[in-house]
Image: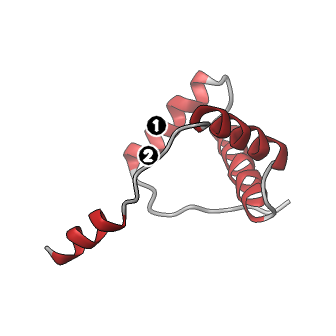
Amino acid sequence: MAQILVENLDPVILEKLENLAKQHGRSLQEELKHILQQAAEKVTHYHIGGDMEKAREALARAQVRYAGKTFSDSTELIREDRER
């Protein structure tokens, strides 16, 4: 397994990470591994399209929420703002 050395880490950040590790009952190293794994998974989901089912559910909720509503055309407002 690879090892990573992080130099010049702000002591405040280190303290926050240590507190987070304590809250989760993990060592600092375990907590950092967990954080990195979560970040890598989020980036991977984002770049490959994420969870399409969740996206479809969010779209369906928005369609229900805004069904039958009309919205004004913001073109004039944008023009006015640009002319300022």
Q: Which residue is mark 1?
A: 16
Q: Tell me if mark 2 has few (under 14), some (14-19) or many (20+) residues whose alpha carbon lies within 10 angstroms of its own.
A: few
Q: Amino acid at mark 1?
A: Lys
Q: Nearer the viewer, residue 52 or 80?
A: 80
Q: Is residue 10 left or right of residue 83?
A: right
Give how far across and how far down residue 2 sits, in percent.
80, 63
Q: Is residue 30 left or right of residue 70?
A: right
Q: Is residue 20 left or right of residue 36?
A: left
Q: Which residue is mark 2?
A: 13
For mark 1, give the secondary structure: helix
The residue drawn where x is 62% and y is 36% is: 67
Q: Tell me if mark 1 has few (under 14), some (14-19) or many (20+) residues whose alpha carbon lies within 10 angstroms of its own.
A: few
Give how far across and how far down residue 71 sits, in percent.
45, 48
Q: Amino acid at mark 2?
A: Ile
- In this view, 30 is above or below 82: above
Q: Is residue 74 left or right of residue 58?
A: left
Name the image quarter holding residue 66.
top right
Give how far across and how far down residue 23 sits, in percent.
58, 22
The residue drawn where x is 70% and y is 44% is: 59
Name the image quarter holding residue 78.
bottom left
* Quarter of the image with the N terminus in it: bottom right
* Quarter of the image with the C terminus in it: bottom left
